[in-house]
Amino acid sequence: MDIRAVKLDVAALRNGLAWAQSWTHQHILCRIGEGQLTFMVAERDGFLAAWTWNAPDLSSSAFFLIPPFIAKLLSSRAMWDVRELKVMTYRNAVGMLLSADQRQPFRLQWHWHATDFASPPYFKLMSRLPDMMISAPYVNLADVIHLAIANVLTPSINEEGEPEPMPNGILIDFMPGQINIDGESIHSHTQQQARYYFNPKMLIRGLEIVRSSHLSFAIREAKRAQNAVLYMACQREGWQIHCAIQSVGVSRTATPPPVQIRETRPPMQGGSWFRGRGD
């Protein structure tokens, strides 16, 4: 490959890939440039997770896919012996030079194909965090979401004693400085206030990935406002970690759900507190 090699932080690459490959058995997207090293995993039904490491020296831009076997190798115990790692890319070919002590460098090389990455419909929107996000304690937000999921999983009993169809979405309504969360069935109304439903399993997966004492979250509407993306993000061990989840339904009723998270300070300045409607 007649191209300049880019030196990567071995520990950062090892740790980032360890996190990413633990959440997928598919190819991992690696993006280098703009002073950052980023790993992404995604699913076509609307889920994306990203781990970003600040690396000011990474001015060259490159992106490539890492197959599951290579990801496991680069995040394994053997990588603790590697002192230097350089990557070279040319179209869909990737080469890595790994140096351990004073030995002859080892070389890894593979080809990748864009179709191997399960890119969701709103990949560009999901891959970058909004400028403004609300901050809240992780435990508080997780409690509210788990309560909403419990509502979803508890079937109602009608007058004949038969259980109603099980709801299948977590309703989240996001306005400036406030987010409302509840579990109820997916349906549509003709009013103007749009609220969005999200897959409970994806919400739980996102919470697991962004585990931290505090996290940030936001919702951004897609172009036609029939879909939205929910973002959850945190800082951990020098990494910026975020998940983006695409909505699975929309409601236009203006009735607020029973649980609210109300921002009492400017976003990202000390966090939020939670309250019920009757408080």
Image (spheres, rainbow, N blue to C red):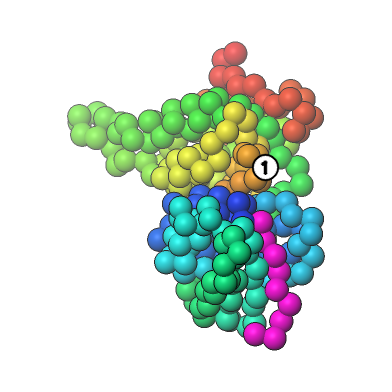
- Which image quarter: residue 263? top right
The reply, left or right, for residue 96 in relation to residue 147 is: right
Residue 7 on the magenta span: yes
**In front of the other: 98 or 165:** 98
Residue at image location 45% in from the left, 44% down from the top? 205
**In front of the other: 78 or 192:** 78
Residue 163 visible in the displayed image: yes
Residue at image location 38% in from the left, 36% down from the top? 152
Q: How many marks?
A: 1
Above or below, 219 against 38 in this view is: above
Please name the residue that numbered disc 1 is placed on.
Answer: 238
Task: Give the residues in magenta.
Answer: 1-9
Residue furthest to the front: 102
Above or below, 237 against 116 in this view is: above
* The C terminus sits in image quarter: top right
Residue 65 visible in the displayed image: no
Amino acid carrying mark 1 in the image: Gly
Badge 1 element: loop
**In front of the other: 122 or 73:** 73
Residue at image location 67% in from the left, 42% down from the top? 238
> Residue 153's x, y, as percent?
33, 35
> Residue 243's x, y, as percent?
57, 48
* The N terminus sits in image quarter: bottom right
> Residue 92's x, y, as percent?
58, 81
Residue 210 on the magenta span: no
- Which image quarter: residue 255? top right
Residue at image location 71% in from the left, 81% down from the top? 3
**Label 1: how many residues lie within 10 Å, few (<14), some (14-19) or many (20+)?**
few
> Residue 37's x, y, as percent?
67, 58
The reply, left or right, for residue 152 in relation to residue 161 is: right
The reply, left or right, for residue 30 in relation to residue 161 is: right
Main secondary structure of the magenta stretch: loop
